Image: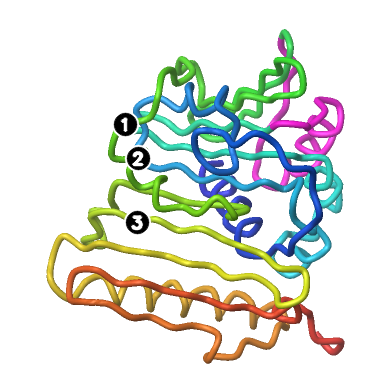
Amino acid sequence: MRQSLVALFVAVVLAACGKSHVDEAPSRVPVIPDSITSQLGTVGFAMAVDLDKIDIAALTVLIPDDPPCIHAVLKTVKVAVLTQSAESWQAYVTGLGQPLLRDCVSKFAPMFGGTVADHGSGFELALGDKPAVFTWTGDTALITEGSNAPHAGDPPAVILELLAKVPRTAKGWLVASGFPKYKIKSATAWMETDPTTGWTFTVIAEASEQDMAKPWLDSIVTGFTAAARAKGATIDPSWFTVTGTPTTAKLVATLPPSAFQVSATK
C-alpha cells in the first residue's frame, strides 16, 4: 500500500499544469494549510501537492487507467499530503468525498488481494500486515496505518528548514531528511507550473559521502524517462540539467506541455 500511495503522489507532482485560482492568505509552508502542518509530527519524509491548482487532464500518462475511477477521484481532491516517520506512514486528503473514494478503493483492492470494510466515520483497506484506515473530519480524510495513532505536533526543525527552500509559487513539493541507502543526507524538491510553457521540477540533494549526489539525481532522470517512454511519451534529454559539487547537486527539469502526450500508435 505504501508503494502504491507514493507512486500515485509522485505521478501527481511530476505531471501537472497551471490553473487560475483565487489568492489566499499564505500558510506557514507552501501548498498545505496550517491545520495540517501542525499535525505532521516527527516525520523524516513529506510530500504534498495542490491538485486544486493543476490540470488533472495532464496526468493521463502517469496515472493508472484501471480502474478508471482513479481519475474521477483526483478531479475532486484539493490538497494531498503523504508523510513517513520511522514507525509509519500517514496521509491527508482534502476535498475528497467518502462515497467516491470508498467505491473506487473497493474496485482496485481485489487487484492486490485486498478487502474493504466500513467502520465509524470511514473504512479500512486490508492489504498486507496492516490495514490502511480512512477517517473523515468534514471534507478532510486522514489515512493512517493499522492501529498506529495519528501523528501530532509540528514537523522537526530539519523538515521545516528544508521546506523553507520551497518557493511560494510551488504547486507541489517533497522533502526528506535523508535516504541512507543512497548516501543522501537530505533532499528538497518542488514543482512549478505555467499554462503556456509547461512546468519546472527542481530537486536539490545533499549527500553524506563524496560523489553520491549527482548519480542519485541522474537515476531519477533515467527512471522518469523510462517510465514516460514506456507509456508512449516522447522525452527530450535536453529538458533535464544536473549540476553541482561532489556533495551537493541540483536537478532542473523543464518540461513543455507536450511532455506527457501519448503516441497515437501506443
- On residue 110, which mark appears? none
- On residue 159, which mark appears? 2
Label 2 residue SS: helix
> How far apart are the two marked residues, 2 and 1, measured between alpha carbons?
5 Å
Q: Position of residue 92 (x, y in %)?
A: 61, 31
| Relative to 143, residue 216 above or below | below
Q: Give the amino acid at mark 3.
A: Ala
> How far apart are the two marked residues, 3 and 1, measured between alpha carbons?
15 Å
Task: Tell whether 197 sits left or right of 82.
Answer: right
Q: Give the amino acid at mark 1.
A: Pro
Q: Which residue is mark 3?
A: 187
Q: Is residue 2 magenta?
A: no
Q: Position of residue 80 (x, y in %)?
A: 64, 40
Q: Position of residue 18 (x, y in %)?
A: 74, 61
Q: Which residue is mark 1?
A: 156
| Relative to 26, residue 172 above or below | below
